[in-house]
Image (cartoon, rainbow, N blue to C red):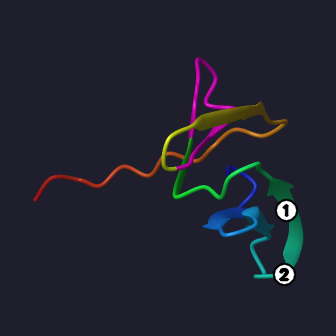
Amino acid sequence: DEQGNLYEATNIGVQIFNAKGEYVGTIHTPYFPVNICFGGPNNDILYMMSWDKIYSIQTKVKGLVLLKAAS
C-alpha cells in the first residue's frame, strides 16, 4: 500500500508486513485466498480471491500502483 505495507495471501488469510518486514497482522478469511489486489474507485478496497469466492474489505489506506515503463 502507499505506506509501504506488503499484503501476502497465505493459507490462514492475508498477512500484512510493514516496510521493515515486520509482521503487522492478519485478515482472516473463511477460505484461504489464492490472490489479492487493491481496487475500487479510490483504490482502497482489498479484494481477496479464493478458488470459488471473492471477499472484499474497505481499508484505511490506498493500494500502491506500480507502473512499468514500456521498453
Q: Which residue is mark 2?
A: 22
The residue that appears at 69% across and 33% down in the rendered structure is 56
Q: Residue furthest bottom?
A: 21
In-front residue for pair 42/13: 13
Q: Secondary structure at mark 2?
A: loop
The residue that appears at 23% across and 53% down in the rendered structure is 69
Residue 7: percent from the left, percent from the top?
A: 67, 61
Amino acid type, residue under disc 2 in the picture: Glu
Whether the residues at callouts 1 and 2 have beta carbons within 8 Å, the answer is no
Q: Is residue 8 above or below residue 3?
A: below
Q: Is residue 47 magenta?
A: yes
Residue 68: percent from the left, percent from the top?
A: 29, 55
Q: Is residue 56 magenta?
A: no
Q: Secondary structure at mark 1?
A: strand
Q: Quadrant of residue 37?
A: top right
Q: Residue furthest left?
A: 71
Q: Give the number of the disc on residue 26.
A: 1
Q: From the image, which quarter does the C terminus lie in? A: bottom left
Q: How many angstroms separate mark 1 from mark 2 (CA)? A: 12 Å
Q: Give the extent of the magenta segment.
A: 38-50
Q: Give the number of the disc on residue 9.
A: none
Q: Quadrant of residue 42?
A: top right
- Is any part of residue 45 visible from this angle? no
Q: Between tags 1 and 2, which lies in front?
A: 1
- Is any part of residue 32 visible from this angle? yes
Residue 5: percent from the left, percent from the top?
A: 73, 62
In-front residue for pair 10/67: 10
The residue that appears at 84% across and 81% down in the rendered structure is 22
23 left or right, relative to 69 = right
Q: Quadrant of residue 39?
A: top right
The residue that appears at 69% across and 38% down in the rendered structure is 62
